[in-house]
């Protein structure tokens, strides 16, 4: 989780500090679920790269609908 993510507000639920980067592929046994969200085993081209851990929102950083 980057410093920027800890200050981001979810555009869907409004919570601050719940945005995490999505990491694709099967998570390793030591995967840090507090820092990242698992995106699953398949990479989605142009898929979401951020997720909210409170409401489940997913989106792309930098899109007009974010934050």
Image (tube, grey):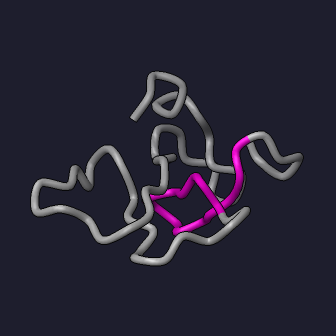
| 24 or 57, nearer to the observer | 24
Q: Which quadrant does the C terminus fall into? A: top right
Magenta portion: prevailing SS class: loop
**x, y percent for residue 58:** 62, 63
Q: Residue at x 64, y 61 (%)?
A: 48
- Residue at the limit of the structure toward the left, as seen here: 29
Q: Residue at x 53, y 39 (%)?
A: 16
- In the rendered image of this protein, does residue 62 appear above or below residue 46? above
- Quarter assignment of residue 59: bottom right
- In the rendered image of this protein, does residue 53 appear above or below residue 16? below
- Residue at the limit of the structure toward the right, as seen here: 64
- Residue at the limit of the structure toward the top, as seen here: 3
State left or right for residue 43 relative to residue 34: right
Q: Which quadrant does the N terminus fall into? A: top left
| 60 or 29, nearer to the observer | 29
Task: Write the start and end of the magenta stretch as one range.
Answer: 48-61
**x, y percent for residue 7:** 53, 28
State left or right for residue 67 relative to residue 65: left
State left or right for residue 37 relative to residue 52: left
- Quarter assignment of residue 8: top right
**x, y percent for residue 4:** 54, 25
Q: Residue at x 46, y 47 (%)?
A: 20
State left or right for residue 51 relative to residue 64: left
């Amino acid at each position: 989780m980057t410093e920027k993510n800890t200050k981001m507000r979810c555009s869907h639920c409004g919570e601050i500090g719940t945005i995490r980067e999505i990491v694709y592929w099967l998570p390793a046994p030591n995967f840090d679920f507090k820092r990242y969200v698992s995106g699953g085993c398949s990479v989605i081209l142009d898929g979401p790269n951020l997720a909210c851990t409170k409401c489940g929102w997913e989106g792309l950083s930098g899109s007009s609908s974010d934050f």
